[in-house]
Image (cartoon, coloured by chain):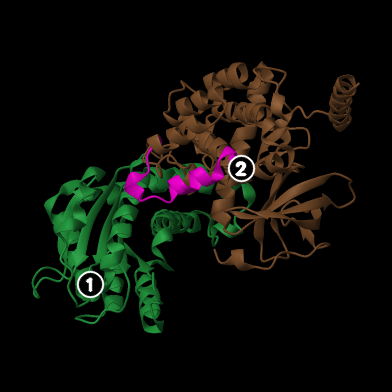
Chain colours: A brown, B green
Amino acid sequence: MGMSSNPPYPAGTVIIGKWRGNRYVVERLLGRGANGTVYLVQREGRRERYALKIGYDTLDLQSEINVLTTLQSRRKRNEHRARQESPLSSYLLEADDFADGNNVPFYVMRYVEGRPLHLFLSRNGSSWLGLVGLKLLDKLRGLHECGFVFGDLKPENVMVSDYGEAELIDFGGASPLGRSVKQFTEWHDRGFWNAGSRTGDENYDLFAFAVLCLRLLNEEGLKTAALQLPQMRSTDELLKLARKLPDKKLSSWLSLALKGGFSGSAEALELWENHIYKTRKREPESMATPRWLKNAFALSLFLLAFTIYWVIRF
Amino acid sequence: MKQILLITDGCSNVGESPVMAAAHALQEGITVNVVGVVDYGTIGELGSREIADIAKAGGGISRIVGTPQLAQTMQMMTRKTVVQTIQQAVNKEVKKILGEGSLEALPPLQRSQVVTVVDELTETSPLRIALLIDASASMKPKLGAVEDAIRDLALSLEAREGSSEIAVFHFPGRSSGEEAMLDMDWTRDLSGIRSLFSRMRMRGATPTGPAIFKVLEHYRYDTLDKHRDRHPAQDHDEREGMIGGYVV
């Protein structure tokens, strides 16, 4: 505690590990999570860039590292069985203490290039939600298979590459299935909406995912619902928002998630894939008619009118 | 594990010093956390110093927040304090075994094992929290938010694997002789919390110190009354065993 107010390390700072001796050069600040500050770094003498998280509190950060370590080993075991998993096993590279920086703990992970989900969608359009949602649900399913819930699921914790690859970042809120959720964000929390417990189960993450979708598609509506008196907050309020969405298949998927109606994330993923991702519809109103065609049409109308005038007159 | 969570908005003005009362609590193995609730204006230098001092004397944490952040703050403080209490106990064991100082000094592998134990105990140790609510007149507009925050805290506690119990007191009591009044005795059931404050009468004085003493008495009385409080001793042994197993 207390270290959170520290000014960020300037670019060029060399972070040397106390136990393993590896050296990382700070390039820039990437962001701040609940447990620490994340920097983009380059391992000295190498080209690859990594994300390095410096913890505010040794215990909190170590707890997060433990989750990542367990996750990694379980994932490797799973990969052994099913070969085609994405190469996520290299998520955590190493953990160490910053020798010169008062022995603050840090860990190094793969750098996920992209932008947070909400910024990605506002830039590229919400038509990407079908694909990105699919990828994100797949990540959640993988996590659940390894026996963990993500907990603090929100757009800020999802990185999306330029081509719609989604990746979860910040595992500070992850906890084993069946345990209490450690970190959460009000709007996305099932307990906040009087919609169920804070015990981490697959449906907890799916609920947060559904709120995430509502927030991406109708942030104002969600805000209004969230600012009501606490005793008025309920699943019904969220269901109302879901029903208002123009895409009816998405509405019913979200309703099911909000009510905790899926047997688990595997089923949720399957339904999303079949009913939302695959039923991409052409949007006639957004298929903009080229300007030249409009002009040509206007010209032909004018010619017609002129011709009729001509014929009648003479 | 035992905690007192004091929710107040100003200075005590009657009876023994609340800082001394908190020091007594710590001596009896009860950690005291304090939330100062401000909405309009500030709590004043004197008030905020007292809040910080009570928490310091009681081995806990203090925060001054507005009602919108109340729920999250209470949840965070409670969790943090549980972790700290366990960490202190575990650190002691680590010191015994390795002769080494703190968690920070341990090499990565051992540290990871110790933290695994701390996380495990944080989730599973039995926990009791006595909420002590300042019901002096100035708190009246904030009680709705306090009630919601308590409900929210109960929700978080319910999700733990270990047993968690809450008792609720407010002060001052009904008559001038009564420092604090018990609104709800130890319970795991949060449905009773809803109507808790409707019966509450607001009065002027703020006898924070005597109220803390009253809660201590309640803890003590309970220890005599039920044998379930032999648990902490057992827990301790277990804990020692676990650490031994993990670290060596």
Q: Does A220 appear in magenta?
A: yes
Residue occupied by mark 1 = B136
What residue range appears in magenta?
Answer: A216-235
| Residue A303 appears left or right of A201 | right
Chain letter behind tag 2? A
Q: Residue at x 40, y 74 (%)?
A: B52
Picture quarter with the N terminus of chain B: bottom left
- Front-lying residue, B11 or B27: B11
| Residue A78 appears left or right of B159 | right
Q: Position of residue B90 (x, y in %)?
A: 45, 54
| Residue B18 appears left or right of B33 | left
Q: Position of residue B57 (x, y in %)?
A: 35, 73
Q: Quadrant of residue A299?
A: top right
- Residue A97 seen: yes
Amino acid under disc 1: Ser
Q: Quadrant of residue A102?
A: bottom right
Q: Does A175 appear in magenta?
A: no
Q: Position of residue A88 (x, y in %)?
A: 71, 32
Query: In what element is the residue under mark 2?
Result: helix
**B197 versus A256 height, above or below:** below
Q: Decide: few, some or many residues near mark 1? Use Cα within 10 Å; few <14, some 14-19, many ≥20.
A: many
How much space separates mark 2 and mark 1, taking CA atoms? 42 Å
Q: Position of residue B103 (x, y in %)?
A: 55, 57
- Front-lying residue, A56 or A104: A56
Query: In what element is the residue under mark 1?
Result: loop
Q: Residue at x 72, y 19 (%)?
A: A84
Q: Decide: few, some or many residues near mark 2? Use Cα within 10 Å; few <14, some 14-19, many ≥20.
A: many
Q: Are marks 2 and 1 on the same chain?
A: no
Residue occupied by mark 2 = A155
Chain letter behind tag 1? B
Amino acid under disc 2: Pro
